[in-house]
Amino acid sequence: MRAAVGALFDLPAEIAESGGAAWSTEPVGNLPGYDRTELVVRLGVIDPDAFDVRRLDALVAMVKPAHIPHRVEVFGRDAD
């Protein structure tokens, strides 16, 4: 994901995902942890209002596993 975003936008992405495994020591016990799967891709850009968020969203949808819901966030950053 990070490489794909970097290749298309030439910017480093922040990626957070809830992947992992959980189990219970009880046969019918509740599983520990957070059961909602989610992928969040954040990208800092100089002008968030002019940035095409749909393009980032489409890229993430193409390269992530299909069963994982995702969202993208774009935020302002200073010019280098």
Image: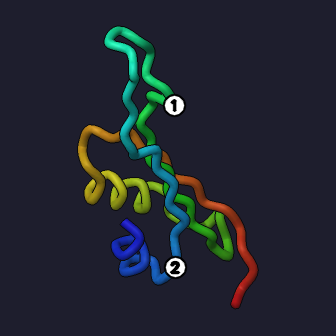
Residue situated in front as seen by the camera: 47 or 28? 28
Label 1, label 2: how many angstroms apart (C-alpha)? 32 Å
Q: Residue at x 67, y 71 (%)?
A: 47
Give the number of the disc on residue 11.
2
- Residue 55: give x, y in percent of width and height: 40, 61
Q: Closer to the observer: label 1 or label 2?
A: 1
Q: Residue at x 44, y 15 (%)?
A: 30
- Residue 57: give x, y in percent of width and height: 41, 54
Q: Residue furthest right?
A: 78
Vertical order, 32 against 26 (above or below): below
Q: Residue furthest front?
A: 25
> Does residue 64 appear to the left or right of 45 in the view shown?
left
Residue for badge 1:
33
Labels 1 & 2 near each other (Cβ < 8 A): no
Vertical order, 17 against 31 (above or below): below
Q: Residue at x 37, y 81 (%)?
A: 7
- Residue 45: give x, y in percent of width and height: 62, 72
Quadrant assignment, res 29: top left
> Does residue 50 appear to the left or right of 18 in the view shown?
right
Label 2: element kind:
loop
- Residue 8: give x, y in percent of width and height: 38, 77
Going from the N terminus, do you reach mark 1 or mark 2 first? Answer: 2
Label 1: element kind:
loop
| Amino acid type shown at disc 2 | Leu
Vertical order, 44 against 56 (above or below): below
Quarter occupied by the C terminus = bottom right
